[in-house]
Image (tube, helix red, strand yellow):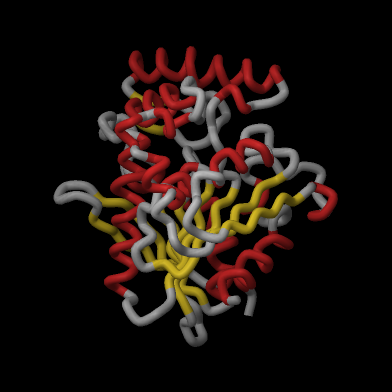
C-alpha cells in the first residue's frame, strides 16, 4: 500500500462557542497504535503536512492536521481580524488536543509543533494527554537572532514595516502577495511583529507567562531543525528550548548534505522529497 492511498476525513473542531477549526483525520488501514497531532507553522496550510500525515498513518498513528482560525480552511482572515497569534497558541492548539483526547481516549497521544505550533507546545498548551512531543524549526524568533544581516533587514521590512501597515490598511496580512504562504489575520500579524522586536521574543511579554509555562513541561521533547534555516538556526532553537527546565530535551540538527538536498530551510523537514529521511527518525522516536 502506498502512503498516498490513505485518504483524510474532514472534521470541524470547536474552539470557542462560536469558532471552530477545519481539521483532517488520516486513519491507518491497520491497527491504530497511537494518535499524532500536527500543529502547523504560521501561514502554512494543513495540506502541506498531508504527505507526512499519510506516512505516519501508514505506521499506525492516526494523524490529525488542521488550519488555525482565520487561515486556510478555517476561515478567511478578512472575516476574523481579531484572531491573534496568541489565540492560536492558547486556544486552537489546546482545543485540538482536547478533542483528540476525548475522541480517542485509550491510545497514546503525541504531537508535532512546526514553528509557532512548537511555541504552543513548549508553553505547555495542548500537552495534557501527550506522552511526548516534537518541535520542528521552532526558535526564539526575536529579530536580533537572525543572521545574516541581509535576512534580518528583509524580515524587519516585512514584519515591522510592510506587515503592520498592510494589515491595518487591508484588514488582514496578504502573505501570499509577499510570497510568504497563506494570508493571516491582522491581529496575528501585529502580535508577531510586536514579539520580534523584544529581546527575548514572547518571553519578554508578561501576559504570555512563557518562561513559567515552559518550566511546567514534564514530558520528553525532541527539538529538530535544519542547519541552513536562516530563521530557526541552531542557536535561536537552543535559546527557545533552554526554557524547558523540567523535562528531557533531545536536540538534532540536520544538514542538506545528510538529506541529499540542495536546501532544507524553514519548511523542508516536513516536505516530501526533502525531509522524508527525517520522518522515520521522528516516528521511531515517538514509538520508542
Q: Estimate the x, y position of residue 22 in percent, counting from the top left.
A: 34, 54
| Relative to 277, 152 lies left or right | left
Query: 201 or 101: nearer the eye?
Result: 201
> Total of numbered circles in the picture?
0
Query: Looking at this view, is 245 or 88 the one in front?
Result: 245
Eyeballing the image, is 52 above or below 71? below
From the viewer's perspective, tell me whether residue 264 is left or right of residue 129: right
**Quadrant in the picture for residue 283:** bottom right
Q: Quadrant of residue 234?
A: top right
Residue 25: % across, % down: 41, 67
Q: Residue at x 41, y 44 (%)?
A: 72
Q: Classify 69 as above or below 128.
A: above
Residue found at the very far left of the displayed protein: 17
Residue 238 point in image, percent of width and height: 62, 42
Quadrant of the snapshot with the N terminus:
bottom right
Left or right: residue 70 versus residue 136 is left
Q: What residue lies at 56% left-to-right and 60% top-to-bottom?
A: 248
The structure residue drawn at horizontal position 44% and vertical position 52%, both measured from the top left corner, is 121
The residue sitting at the front extreme is 246
- Residue shown at the point (54%, 41%) measured from the top left: 240
State left or right for residue 285 relative to residue 86: right
Quarter holding the C terminus? bottom right
278 or 25, which lies in front?
A: 278
Q: Is residue 286 above or below residue 37?
A: below
Give the x, y percent position of residue 137: 60, 45
Amino acid at each position: 500500500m502506498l502512503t498516498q492511498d490513505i485518504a483524510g476525513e474532514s472534521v470541524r473542531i470547536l474552539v470557542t462557542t462560536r469558532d471552530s477549526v477545519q481539521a483532517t483525520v488520516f486513519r491507518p488501514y491497520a491497527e491504530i497504535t497511537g494518535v499524532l497531532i500536527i500543529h502547523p507553522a504560521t501561514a502554512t496550510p494543513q495540506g502541506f503536512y498531508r504527505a507526512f500525515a499519510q506516512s505516519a498513518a501508514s505506521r499506525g498513528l492516526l494523524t490529525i492536521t488542521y488550519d488555525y482560525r482565520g487561515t486556510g480552511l478555517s476561515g478567511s482572515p478578512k472575516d476574523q481580524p481579531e484572531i491573534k497569534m496568541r489565540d492560536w497558541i492558547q486556544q486552537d492548539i489546546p482545543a485540538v488536543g482536547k478533542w483528540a483526547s476525548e475522541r480517542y481516549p485509550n491510545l497514546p497521544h503525541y504531537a508535532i509543533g512546526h514553528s509557532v505550533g512548537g511555541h504552543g507546545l513548549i508553553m505547555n498548551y495542548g500537552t495534557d494527554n501527550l506522552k511526548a512531543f516534537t518541535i520542528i524549526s521552532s526558535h526564539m524568533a526575536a529579530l536580533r537572532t537572525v543572521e545574516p544581516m541581509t535576512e534580518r533587514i528583509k524580515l524587519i521590512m516585512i514584519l515591522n514595516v510592510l506587515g503592520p501597515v498592510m494589515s491595518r490598511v487591508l484588514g488582514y496580512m496578504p502573505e501570499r502577495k509577499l510570497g510568504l504562504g497563506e494570508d493571516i489575520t491582522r491581529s496575528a500579524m501585529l502580535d508577531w511583529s510586536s514579539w520580534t522586536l523584544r529581546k527575548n521574543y514572547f518571553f519578554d511579554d508578561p501576559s504570555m507567562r512563557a518562561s513559567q509555562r515552559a518550566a511546567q513541561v514534564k514530558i520528553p521533547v525532541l527539538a529538530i531543525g535544519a542547519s541552513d534555516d536562516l530563521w530557526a538556526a541552531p542557536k535561536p532553537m537552543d535559546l527557545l528550548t533552554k526554557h524547558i527546565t523540567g523535562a528531557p530535551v533531545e536536540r538534532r540538527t540536520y544538514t542538506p548534505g545528510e538529506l541529499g538536498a540542495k536546501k532544507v530551510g524553514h519548511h523542508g523537514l516536513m516536505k516530501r522529497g526533502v525531509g522524508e529521511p527525517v520522518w522515520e527518525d521522528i516516528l521511531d522516536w515517538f514509538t520508542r
